[in-house]
Amino acid sequence: MMTHNTMPKIVVTQPVHAEVLQTLQAAGEVVMNPGPEPWSDAERQRHLADAEAMMAFMTDRVDQDTLLNAPRLRTIACALKGYDNFDLAACAAAGVSVSFVPDLLTEPTAELAVGLAIAAARHVLPGDNVVRTGYAGWRPTLYGTGLHGSVVAVVGLGAVGRAIVDRLSGFGCAEMLGVDPQHEDPRVQRVGLDEALARADYILLATPLTPASHHLIDDAALARVRPGLILVNIGRGSVVDEAAVSRALHNGHLGAYAADVYEMEDWLLPARPRAVHPGLIGHARTVLTPHLGSAVQRVRLAIELRAADNMIRALRGEALTHLAIALT
């Protein structure tokens, strides 16, 4: 007599470490994308059609249509901190829990933010190119800006913003400003965005994407910055209007732009661009990394393990701490 497999189907949309895969395979029937390219929408939907659980990554988007075609889905475990690519209202209406990993990405993302600021201000990429294309010794060129003695503003004083302040504290900045209506940090002078734009030599964006923060940095904001500003974005791509940044770079008002996040990644925004703005790609004063904020080997393993634990606990009906939505 044949018996039916009662283990839940688990869809993992990007490859995970072997240890994580083994953990998931002990809990269910796993279908995993070998990656690194994401599945097409159609292929992902085919796998989700009879799935009960999904481990999701930055490349994923879940909206009402996704859920309508995944009637057995019970839980989505996000192996990431931000969940703005997931329609939480639609998930709640469908009875699908959404969990996330809030803290493990904080330190490596803050490290990268400071690294990007230094790389942009000190002309690291043009300097690297000089050496690779025929270095003949020191020349009086590529003079940049240092954090020491500069006014630095951090926009967003959540966990990542405060971790950035931790790292900046050792650089001897002349002043550290903080822009955040909800959070405080005694090490920074709390100011409004307009004051930060007018005073800062560096601005580091560490704010999530919300209706209020969408295109927070646009043409009008960039017109108010100090000439030569170093702008760094490690929050969400659409906090910045990339076309406006391109214009400010090309007219010489903005000193440099460094980013690890891009508008084209904000999948739920219907008007999002489909590529990084070409004016950023082709400009000598940009430093652009492919969303490397959490790309530290042991950190990625820890994130995947936490997401797997969230998923397994949700499938068992156990309470979870880090839920983007609470189902009743």
Image: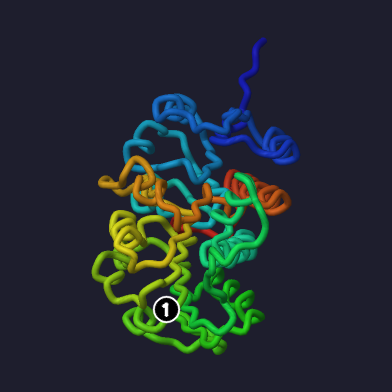
Give residue 270's position: percent from left, percent from top.
Answer: 27, 45
Residue visible at 62% across and 64% down in the picture: 111
Badge 1 amino acid: Asp
Q: Is residue 108 above or below residue 230?
A: above
Q: Nearer the viewer, residue 236 or 277?
A: 277
Tell me where residue 252 sits by quadrant: bottom left
Tell me the quarter of the image containing the C terminus. Answer: bottom left
Position above or below: 176 against 285: below
User: In the rendered image, which residue does mark 1 sit on?
Assistant: 180
The way the protein has been coloured in the rendering is rainbow
Identify which residue, 112 or 324, lies in the foreground: 112
From this view, report whether residue 182 is shown above or below residue 70.
below
The residue positioned 57% from the left and 62% from the top of the image is 119
Residue pictured at 54% horizontal, 64% vertical: 141
Residue 183 % position (x, y) = 47, 80
The number of callouts visible is 1
Residue 263 placement (x, y as % from top left): 37, 51
Seen from this angle, which residue lies furthest top?
A: 1
Whole-percent x and y of residue 181? 39, 80
| Image quadrant where one finds the N terminus | top right
Element class at badge 1:
loop
Q: Is residue 304 above or below residue 14?
A: below
Mark 1 Cα shell of 10 Å, populated few (<14), some (14-19), many (≥20): some
Q: Nearer the viewer, residue 227 or 289?
A: 227
